[in-house]
Amino acid sequence: MLDKKYLTLKESVKLLLDYIEFRCLSFEIVSIESAYNRITYEDILAPENLPGFKRSTVDGFAVRSQDTFGAKETMPVYLTVKGHIPMGVAPDFSLNPGEAASIGTGGMLPEGADAVVMIEHVNVVSSDLIEILKPIGPGENVIFEDEDIKEGELVIPKGHKLKPQDIGALAGLGISQIKVVKKPVIAIILTGDEIIPYTEKVTPGKIRDINSFTLAGLIDLAGGIPLKMGIVKDDYKELKAIVNKAYELADIILITGGTSAGIKDMTAQIINELGEPGIIFHGVSIKPGKPIIAGVCNNKPVFGLPGHPVAVYICFELFVKPVINKMLGLTDKTYKPKVKAKLTKSISSQAGRRDFIRVYLEEKEGELLATPLLSKSGLIMTLVKANGILCIPEDLLGFEKDEIVEVELL
Amino acid sequence: MLDKKYLTLKESVKLLLDYIEFRCLSFEIVSIESAYNRITYEDILAPENLPGFKRSTVDGFAVRSQDTFGAKETMPVYLTVKGHIPMGVAPDFSLNPGEAASIGTGGMLPEGADAVVMIEHVNVVSSDLIEILKPIGPGENVIFEDEDIKEGELVIPKGHKLKPQDIGALAGLGISQIKVVKKPVIAIILTGDEIIPYTEKVTPGKIRDINSFTLAGLIDLAGGIPLKMGIVKDDYKELKAIVNKAYELADIILITGGTSAGIKDMTAQIINELGEPGIIFHGVSIKPGKPIIAGVCNNKPVFGLPGHPVAVYICFELFVKPVINKMLGLTDKTYKPKVKAKLTKSISSQAGRRDFIRVYLEEKEGELLATPLLSKSGLIMTLVKANGILCIPEDLLGFEKDEIVEVELL
């Protein structure tokens, strides 16, 4: 019983992404202190060498390496200690043949020196004489002036999400401001006569807004700025007005609940009226999330997300996040964190449909177990209790109890 | 050649954590909008049922299930349509035997109804008469009033890091403010006569601050608040004054570069003078990061981190983060995201020592390859280029080229 009416997940995502221009968002200039987790807008090249001078990586004695050639425990080489190199200053002397200078980790080598003998490998005979017991090669225990980063070299490529150590490297190069991709503003419109703000008391038939809170958190994690547009009644004029406003203010528009019976046709019509080409697809062969609507209106992605809390989550991860990543121009290869676990219950699916099952991962006697949290998809608690998602692909009818499955971490 | 002088990683972390009191940080009350990624301070129980009323999960007709028993395609059951239930209101009628009511997804069932027949399984004969073609069980296509969350039930346990869907569930329950664990303030003190602020021009022998930027980002990701205390010269009095100040302001103190020759004894002395018990260990059998100092002074953890950028990163992840997690009272089981990859070069280690090798993961012809980025540990660029960390445990002498290894994602 193949679900032939609908696109597969892969087909639908490809179709949608083909309409999205890579790195279509503009840039802004920010200080590196504000650049953590932001996406670089252009390649960042090194304005200078790092460290910029020959630097010792150990505590010991800077030497001319050729002076040490032939040194043995039985026949040490004697070197005159010319002085001590304080940290943070250029030595005011250079080394002539037969001379050494004491130096700390991070200290600058004097002119003439090309290696540092570790303190442990030296016999200090007197304050100005040391014995070297074995030879040392040129460059040993030294970082050369352009060894960490060379002037003009690529430090961070464009389209990279900046990690703490990246910001560290930029600081080390004295780069204080950089161009990053602007965060996309993502409008959240809630539809449904039954939805009330979370601050209101429920009366029979009403349900508080859950989805704008889940979505706001997901948008933030994905590098966007959530813009809550409020709750709209199932009314064409009202919905159209707020979608038009969102279109002015936001880069992406999410309409939740816009796929249910009362409002489905309305949402579809409004997306088609908003701009070309309008709706790209309506319905995908997945569960939950099947009734999703995706459109692009004059280059702005517009989604009609199912109202069920779990479907909202899944649809965001499957459709909205890849769109955000492409708009941001993210080029990092990302690997979804997965673990292997043993299934505690059999679960079945429908051929031709991709199912996403919430599971609870638990270690018992050294074994990782995955328990499917099966329930009606309208329930938020299965998603709260879950710490993993198991995918049943289109070509399988399910998994057996005790089968080892790959679970994506939530 | 076992590295017998030093503790193993496991021994040192255990020793340190034994001095840290679980959930020793205080709480603060925040709105749920500000609670994303925060750690719950106490169990959160449901103040009411969710959804709070019998709710349809499909578009169709609310019925009394027993009325449909015995229905067949050849002998349908006829029901009178009593009316339509608008979304978001309690129906103003109840169902008597032989009656049905049209309802949308999310609508409230009328008194008497206990199931909803999907629109697809109904023949609409006229505006007030429908044919039911097969029986439906009680509760089918219905979420009961306490089925998502029951009043008094545990919604979120204490010690949990709040995800977007958790905040969604809290909103659904009308919970607007919660107790979360206070973020630990973590002081960063940079030591070294050679260190200058990143805004200054380098002169020979000087090097700009890299570590405070890497650490600030790592602290933020770990749920703490970085407090930059500036750069201190290698001077006992100056360092002591700033450590004392940090002790007043912060929950954890990080002194970077405090393990190098010039300042090592000074740092150790100051930690021991700061409070009881003082230094817990000095040096661990790992690479990089071996000279790390960890102390606890009147319940405040104080670290002397090596000055090398890579060692700082590794030591933070291995020692500081578990301390933060214990102070926050985090109880979530976390699984470090790992991938399996094929090593492109052999790498060797020393028995008894745990090595952390930066690697670059790359997919080639469907195979994931890990290339070790071997270099002197003073270099920040290996960490910038790396997207994975490979650990060589104490009992191995390394890995062979083409071996399949487990790489932790960076």
Image: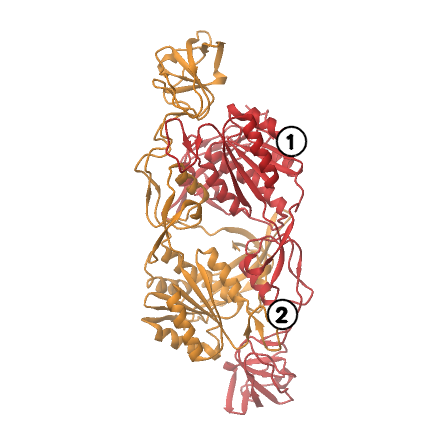
Chain colours: A red, B orange
Please identify, in this view, whether the residue under mark 1 or under mark 2 is nearer the observer.
Answer: 1
Instruction: Count residues near mark 2 (Cα–Cα under 10 Å), then give few for <14, some for 14-19, many for 20+.
Output: many
Residue B266 screen position, x and y as percent: 42, 78
Rendered position, B244 above or below A373: below
Q: Amino acid at mark 1?
A: Gly
* Circles 1 and 2 on the same subunit: yes
Which chain does the residue under circle 2 lie in?
A: A
Mark 1 touching mark 2, by CB under 8 A? no
Q: Secondary structure at mark 1?
A: strand
Camera sees residue A45: yes
Q: Residue furthest top?
A: B75
Question: Which residue is rendered at x = 43% and y = 26% of the image?
Answer: B88
Check disc 1 and report the residue beneath it: A278
Decide if residue A284 is in sight here.
no
N-term mark: 1 or 2 = 2
Q: Which mark is residue A50?
A: 2
Q: Dot 1: within a 10 Å radius of its alpha carbon, few (fewer than 14), some, or many (20 or more) residues?
A: many
Q: Is residue B21 above or below residue B30?
A: below
**Relative depth, front residue between B9 and B92:** B92
Is residue A104 toward the left or the right of residue B149 in the image?
A: right
Instruction: Give residue B23's quadrant in the image.
Output: bottom left
| Relative image position of residue B163 (x, y in whole percent) | 44, 45
- What chain does badge 1 belong to? A
Q: Is residue A398 left or right of residue B369?
A: left
Q: Nearer the viewer, residue A56 or A280?
A: A280
Residue A348 placement, left or right of B365: left
Judge whether B116 appears above or below A33 on screen.
Answer: above
Q: How many marks?
A: 2
Residue depicted at x 53% and y 62%:
B357
